[in-house]
Image (tube, rainbow, N blue to C red):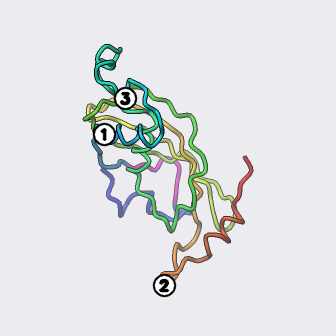
Amino acid sequence: MTDPATSPLALDFDELEPGMSFVTPGRTVTESDVVAFAGLTGDFHPHHVDAEWARTSQFGERIAHGMLVLSVAAGLVPTDPDRVLALRRVSDAVLKRPVRLGDTIHVEGSLESAREVSEEAGLAVWRWRVLNHRAEMVARVAVEVLWRRGPAASPAGDTVESDSALEAKFVLPL
């Protein structure tokens, strides 16, 4: 696991360099996670919620929703709200293996690129690999993050510029 204090996720945008990487702690995906996600999203596919049906499936048991796996992965990645302005894009997601109830997953991320958008922000493109406790890759995804450039906060703790002012500057074209 990467020490949060030395993680590239704690750096100023201008300190980021392609190839920098991080590893998150793990988190076990539970039955409660799957049931709550099904209720929240309305995705009650029997692979996820019907133990008897799932027992006869190709997986032999219930599995986590793919979108739940990606959501848990996103929650594992520590983001500094004074640096990370917005999640810009999630792309190229590939679900490689099922995540079974009781599997522990973690994220290994590497910075693919970082480019300036303006004097106030840059766009960082991360490649995440989600692995289970058996070191098997269960998913991979590209994540683009709008990253504040320059000091994250003033000595008084106020942000350099209001979030609404920054939002107006950084509405990027699709």
Instruction: State the image quarter where residue 5 is shown.
Output: bottom left
1 or 3: tag closer to the N-terminus:
1
Q: Which residues are magenta?
A: 16-22
How many angstroms separate mark 2 from mark 1 (CA)?
Answer: 40 Å
The relative height of residue 17 versus residue 66 in the rendered view (above or below) is below
Amino acid under label 3?
His
151, 38: nearer the viewer:
38
Check disc 2 and report the residue beneath it: 155
Tell me the mark number nearer the camera, choosing from 2 and 1.
1
131, 15: nearer the viewer:
131
**Residue under the image location 57 percent in, 57 percent down:** 86
- Residue 29 has which mark? 1
Tell me the mark number nearer the camera, choosing from 2 and 3.
3
Q: Is residue 98 magenta?
A: no
Q: Tell me where residue 149 appears, x and y as whole percent.
A: 59, 67
- Residue 48 has which mark? 3
Q: Given contact means CB atoms under 8 Å apart, are the residues at marks 2 and 1 in contact? A: no
Instruction: State the image quarter where residue 33 is shown.
Output: top left
The relative height of residue 162 versus residue 173 in the rendered view (above or below) is below
Q: Tell me where residue 47 appears, x and y as whole percent.
A: 38, 24
Q: Secondary structure at mark 1?
A: loop
Q: For this view, does 165 lie left or right of residue 90?
A: right
2 or 3: tag closer to the N-terminus:
3
Amino acid under label 2?
Pro
The relative height of residue 57 versus residue 83 in the rendered view (above or below) is above
Q: Quick one: label 3, few (<14), some, or many (20+) residues within 10 Å?
A: many
Amino acid under label 1?
Val
